[in-house]
Image (tube, rainbow, N blue to C red):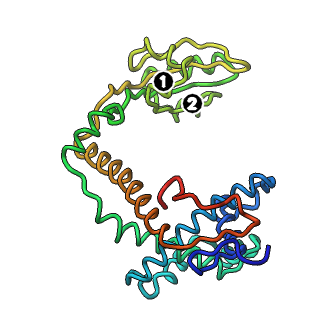
């Protein structure tokens, strides 16, 4: 699609750039992602366009206030990204996506600039008091409790005697790998918090003590038995880790608020024009989350 998708204070966003950003965000350049229908495609364009408008606003601010990327930063990041691909695979990916490397580099520049904006401009504005930490902790105490943990073995096999023999050896202390070699069974070693254990398994494991095993039961074409190894009681996270998690949560919450407020002020001072082809994408404010 030729022409510009939008113009932000005189700086254009081409449809080629918009498509490059859409492919990167929604498909990751994977050839296995099915093409969206027209409605979904239009929705993707609108969402990506809103993000790109925000990025351009940020880039313009950073450039005007002397926060441009350090010389060589863009090239260094491209080298780092390319190093994750086999020789020639990165360029093949760009070509398969029908993209131009220049558009990809523009998107990379915007991403790095936004990251620098968040860390150098907004992050220093965030302050967190001890009272805020305490209040957040009291309101979210359940988030800092480690549920009871059950460690058990699940023995499966088509021959009931093989399952029974393996179960007997496991309860006598024989290593699971050794027991599996000796018998025609599959032994699954499972370490799972109690809240994630399926109800049917939890009902069998609940009355068992460490070292005990359930009865062998038939399930479909297989026989199965459970051997409980250990139950680790629920516990509260270490105070240092709790503090770190609370401060991170509060920091992200404040970042979103500060970002939205900053962006709304900047948007009042600029002119944004959207092409009629994407007229439903009239810009209404910052995306759902800060970049």
- Name the one closer to the observer, 126 or 244: 126
**Position of 34 relative to 188 (above/below):** below
Q: Is residue 241 above or below residue 176?
A: below
Left of 145 or right of it: where is 82?
Answer: right
Q: Nearer the viewer, mark 2 or mark 1?
A: 2
- Establish if 45 lies above or below 241: below
Asked whether 181 or 67 is in front, the reply is 67
Q: Circle 2: is it few (<14), some (14-19), or many (20+) Cα within 10 Å?
A: many
Determine which residue is flagged by label 2: 187
The residue to which callout 1 is attached is 170
Q: Position of residue 110 (x, y in %)?
A: 53, 74
Depicted 156 relative to depicted 140: above or below: above
Q: Residue at x 66, y 60 (%)?
A: 281
Question: Which of the marked residues, 2 or 1, is nearer the chain's N terminus?
Answer: 1
- Labels 2 & 1 near each other (Cβ < 8 A): yes
Q: Residues within 10 Å of mark 1 (few under 14, many from 20)?
A: many
Determine which quarter of the picture holds residue 138. top left
If the image is split into quadrants, where does the N terminus sit? bottom right
Residue under the image location 53 percent in, 67 percent down: 54
Q: How many marks?
A: 2
Nearest the viewer among 59 and 139 is 59
Q: Secondary structure at mark 1?
A: helix
In-image side of 2 versus 162 (left or right)? right
Task: Tell which of 113 and 170 is nearer to you.
Answer: 113
Q: Tell me how far mark 2 sits from mark 1, CA to CA.
A: 10 Å
Q: Position of residue 202 (x, y in %)?
A: 50, 18
Residue 179 x/y as whole percent: 54, 29
Residue 281's disc number: none
Which corner quadrant of the image does residue 180 belong to?
top right
């Amino acid at each position: 699609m030729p022409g510009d998708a939008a113009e932000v204070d005189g700086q254009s966003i081409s449809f080629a750039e918009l498509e490059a950003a859409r492919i990167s965000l929604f498909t990751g350049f994977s050839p296995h992602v099915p093409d969206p229908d027209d409605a979904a495609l239009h929705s993707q364009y609108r969402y990506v366009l809103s993000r790109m408008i925000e990025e351009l606003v940020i880039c313009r601010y950073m450039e005007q206030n002397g926060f441009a990327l350090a010389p060589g930063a863009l090239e260094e990041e491209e080298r780092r990204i390319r190093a994750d691909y086999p020789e020639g695979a990165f360029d093949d990916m760009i070509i398969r996506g029908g993209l131009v490397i220049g558009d990809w580099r523009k998107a990379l520049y915007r991403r790095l600039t936004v990251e620098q904006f968040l860390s150098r401009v907004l992050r220093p504005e965030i302050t967190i008091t001890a009272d805020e930490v305490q209040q957040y902790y009291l309101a979210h105490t359940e988030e800092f409790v480690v549920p009871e943990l059950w460690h058990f073995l699940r023995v499966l096999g088509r021959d009931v005697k093989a399952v029974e023999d393996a179960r007997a050896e496991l309860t006598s202390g024989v290593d699971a790998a050794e027991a599996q070699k000796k018998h025609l069974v599959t032994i699954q070693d499972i370490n799972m918090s109690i809240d994630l254990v399926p109800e049917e398994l939890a009902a069998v494991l609940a009355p068992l003590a460490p070292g005990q095993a359930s009865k062998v039961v038939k399930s479909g074409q297989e026989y199965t038995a459970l051997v409980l190894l250990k139950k680790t009681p629920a516990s509260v996270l270490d105070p240092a880790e709790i503090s770190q998690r609370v401060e991170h949560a509060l920091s992200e919450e404040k970042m979103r608020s500060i970002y939205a407020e900053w962006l709304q002020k900047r948007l009042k001072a600029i002119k944004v024009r959207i092409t009629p082809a994407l007229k439903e994408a009239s810009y209404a404010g910052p995306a759902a989350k800060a970049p």
